[in-house]
Image: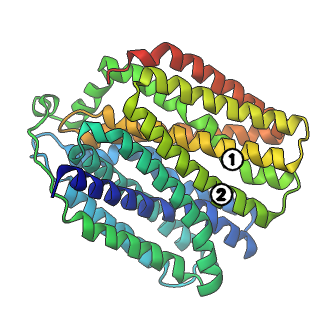
Amino acid sequence: MSPAVRNGLRQALFGWLNLALTAPGVYLWLGLPLVLRQHGWSGTAIGLFQLASLPTVFKFLFALPLDRPGRPRGNYRAWAVCLLLAYAAVLGALAWRDLLDDKRILFALAASAALAGTWADVPVNALAIRVLPASERAWAGGIRSMALCLGAIAGGGLMLVAHARWGWQAPFLIMAGALILGAALTAFVTERREPDAPSATCAPLATASLMAYFRLDSTRRWLPLLALLFPFIGSGWFYLKPLLLDQGLAPERVAWLVGVAGGAVGAAASALSARASKRLRPALTVPWHAAASCAALLGLAAAVWLQAPPPVLIACALGIAAAMGAMAALAFSLMMSHARPGLQALDYGIQSSVFSLTRILAPLAAGVLMDAAGQAWMLTALGVAAAGVWLLALRTARMLNL
């Protein structure tokens, strides 16, 4: 088998794994709340249910056992297979019986699913960093972003259809089956073994490897940029559905526009971003992506301020989807390039924790601003913040060591 075909099959596998990992989270945090509301859950109860996703913030802690000092490197495949199966088992437990009237058990199993999914994500993407050559990482970031967009379509749309037609168990069983298939295919991946990283072999504790990462000059330049690249355009995407509903669009139309068409546009933008990232240096691609996010947010803000007709709002919404997909692809590809040999899981976990923390906090702040001042002011504030990120990108992107 030629290297090109082998790398293509690996890219397809990691795309499937990221889709299978994404869909359950989207269903639990974005799709299932609609079902819960229909069954009488209060807004407060649904809001508290979201706290079950907090394990995503601590991904770097889950990476420590994978790259523990003194252990031979090369076990990401085994970790990935075991954790994918564990995630499937939790989804199977959720499918055991209808839990709509049992809030505590549902919350506990949802938190377990978040834990399993967050932990499984670490060895899966660390394995991708290890087995894919550096020339393929831009495509890997784009494929992962496309998988996330398709996972949003599956978890936020198709699984709701499955629930409506076949009942409570169907979505969880379908998603568990996707994870089991991914685990079976991952078992056939050939993983090269690597020597211990110097920082790991000399350190008596795993925390020394973690702290060493923060002392790198490239890390101190990259992490602040990573923390700010995505959350503002991500917040605009997060509030698109309620915004369009409040602008008078029918719920079913919003679901198709944002959930399906928006996801497809985001996936296409991810592919274009990956192509650009493979050919151009971050000094060009990072500012361009930041500028696109700023323009998309300010464009939608202007449309809301001017009470634009639905076709204009829809065009601006698709612009948000495109900017979101492109930015996610860029961020994921750059995360792959900022991982030390032999410590891919730990370094990916650190970056992913930073990415997840700001991605969670920014929508919370945006929601408070929307309630206090309205949607137009919220979008304007997000656009201004994105403009600041653009200026930061112009200043720091050329110094990234890639």
Going from the N terminus, do you reach mark 1 or mark 2 first?
A: 2
- Circles 1 and 2: CB atoms closer than 8 Å: yes
What residue type is disc 2 on? Ala
Helix, strand or loop status at disc 1: helix
| Mark 1 crowdedness (10 Å alpha carbons): few <14, some 14-19, many ≥20 | many
Is residue 155 shown above or below 353? below
Q: In the orientation shown, which residue stands out farthest toward the top?
A: 395
Q: Nearer the viewer, residue 142 or 159?
A: 142
- What residue is disc 1 on? 318
Residue at 27% x, 43% y: name it: 129
The spot of residue 367 in percent (x, y) is: 73, 43
Q: Nearer the viewer, residue 306 or 41?
A: 306
Residue 108 in view (yes/no): yes
Answer left or right for 34 relative to 23: right
Is residue 199 shown above or below 344? above
Helix, strand or loop status at disc 2: helix
Work out which quarter of the rendered image holds the C terminus and state it: top left
Q: Nearer the viewer, residue 200 or 295?
A: 295
- What residue is disc 2 on? 261
The spot of residue 325 in percent (x, y) is: 55, 44
| Mark 2 crowdedness (10 Å alpha carbons): few <14, some 14-19, many ≥20 | some
Residue at 44% x, 20% y: name it: 283
Answer left or right for 204 relative to 53: left
What residue type is disc 1 on? Leu
Residue at 76% x, 59% y: name it: 254
